[in-house]
């Protein structure tokens, strides 16, 4: 995260010691806290502040102590510094709402595993779906959502290709909970060729091990036990999760949890639907979704 200050070193220093407005040391502390709440690929974004016209040496040290990188010429000799350059008083030191509490809730940042990808149920659906194959999107589906998905495929928004490109060169993993859920869907509404495509997929099944921060997320309409298992496993493995579940990603974001995901457009299993339409039958049997 980059910030730029174009004020003179003297003016930004006076703002700091006067306590008028929001000084740069305080901004740096707040930015550093917010960065911890917006982890990207298991890393906290670096906060950098560039002072175009110089920066008070001691003020820069305060900002660096808060976790920000400071760029610009260091200037000393301002009012408020002791004989040895130490700081005498900082008006922001008394701010109760600027504590240094870590909002990451114990989340440990660090290295990521770029050798594997975690597949959500939605990714398995898209990889198996007849709609995502050449010519598979042609039937005039009656379901509005399926019809919109077919139109997107017609426009070249191929979910399968996007997922395959994300997997290429990596090892795909699927947690056991997601696999069981997908197999249930496939057995219920999947066609023979969709089942064959699924059986031809290469992936490793892993037991779901939910990371502590995902385990602490309360369940809701937008974040169910299934989402907890899928995203918690990806979080625990420290690898990217391929998903179409943007609602779950937003739900986590609303609780200051940033999930590392590659989102793909949602797709449905359509082989049985297309076959029934071709025979002049209703698109789906009663009770099917």
Image (cartoon, helix red, strand yellow):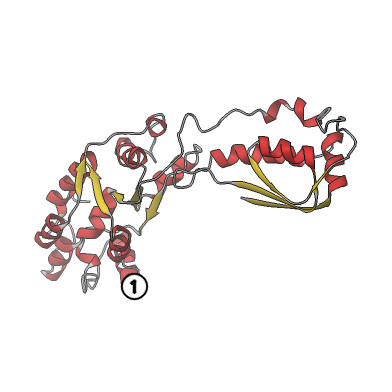
Q: Relative to residue 75, is residue 263 depicted above or below? A: below
Which sits in the foreground, 186 or 72?
72
In the displayed structure, does residue 20 sit left or right of residue 194? Answer: right
Q: In this orientation, which residue lies closer to the viewer: 120 or 136?
A: 120
Residue 234: x %, y % from top left = 33, 42
* Relative height, residue 230 to residue 131 (above, below): above
Q: Residue at x 39, y 44 (%)?
A: 248
Task: Where is residue 142? Give x, y as percent.
Answer: 26, 64
The structure residue drawn at horizontal position 84% and vertical position 37%, both measured from the top left corner, is: 20
Q: Position of residue 81 (x, y in %)?
A: 86, 33
Task: Report helix, strand or loop for mark 1.
Answer: loop
Residue 213 seen in this snapshot: yes
Mark 1 residue crowding within 10 angstroms, few (<14) / some (14–19) / many (20+) = few
Q: Which of the pair 136/170 is nearer the observer?
A: 170
Where residue 260 appears, as percent x and y from the top left, is 41, 47
Q: Which residue is mark 1?
A: 156
Furthest-right residue in this view: 79
- Seen at 29% across and 67% down, the residue is 150
Residue nearest the viewer, comparing 189 with 203: 203
The quadrant holding residue 149 is: bottom left
Q: Quadrant of residue 15?
A: top right
Q: Is residue 282 visible?
A: no
């Amino acid at each position: 995260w980059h910030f730029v200050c174009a004020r003179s070193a003297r003016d930004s220093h006076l703002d700091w010691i006067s306590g008028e407005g929001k000084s740069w040391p305080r901004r740096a502390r707040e930015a550093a806290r917010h960065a911890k709440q917006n982890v990207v690929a298991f890393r906290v974004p670096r906060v950098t502040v560039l002072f175009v016209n110089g920066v008070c040496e001691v003020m820069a040290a305060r900002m660096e102590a808060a976790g920000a990188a400071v760029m610009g010429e260091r200037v000393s000799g301002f009012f408020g510094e002791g004989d040895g350059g130490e700081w005498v008083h900082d008006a922001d030191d008394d701010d109760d709402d600027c504590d240094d509490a870590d909002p990451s809730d114990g989340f440990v940042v660090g290295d990521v595993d770029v050798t594997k990808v975690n597949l959500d149920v939605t990714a398995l659906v898209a990889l198996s779906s007849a709609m995502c194959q050449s010519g598979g999107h042609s039937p005039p589906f009656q379901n509005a959502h399926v019809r919109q998905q077919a139109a997107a495929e017609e426009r070249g928004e191929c979910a399968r290709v996007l997922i395959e490109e994300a997997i290429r060169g990596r090892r795909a993993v699927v947690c056991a909970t997601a696999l069981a859920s997908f197999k249930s869907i496939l057995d219920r509404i999947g066609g023979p060729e969709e089942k064959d495509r699924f059986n031809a997929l290469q992936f490793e099944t892993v037991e779901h091990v939910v990371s502590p921060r995902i385990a602490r997320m309360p369940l809701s309409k937008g974040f169910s036990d299934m989402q907890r298992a899928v995203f918690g496993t990806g979080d625990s493995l420290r690898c990217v999760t391929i998903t179409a579940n943007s609602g779950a990603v937003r739900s986590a974001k609303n609780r200051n949890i940033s999930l590392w995901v590659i989102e793909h457009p949602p797709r449905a299993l359509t082989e049985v639907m297309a076959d029934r339409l071709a025979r002049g039958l209703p698109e789906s049997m009663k009770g099917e979704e």
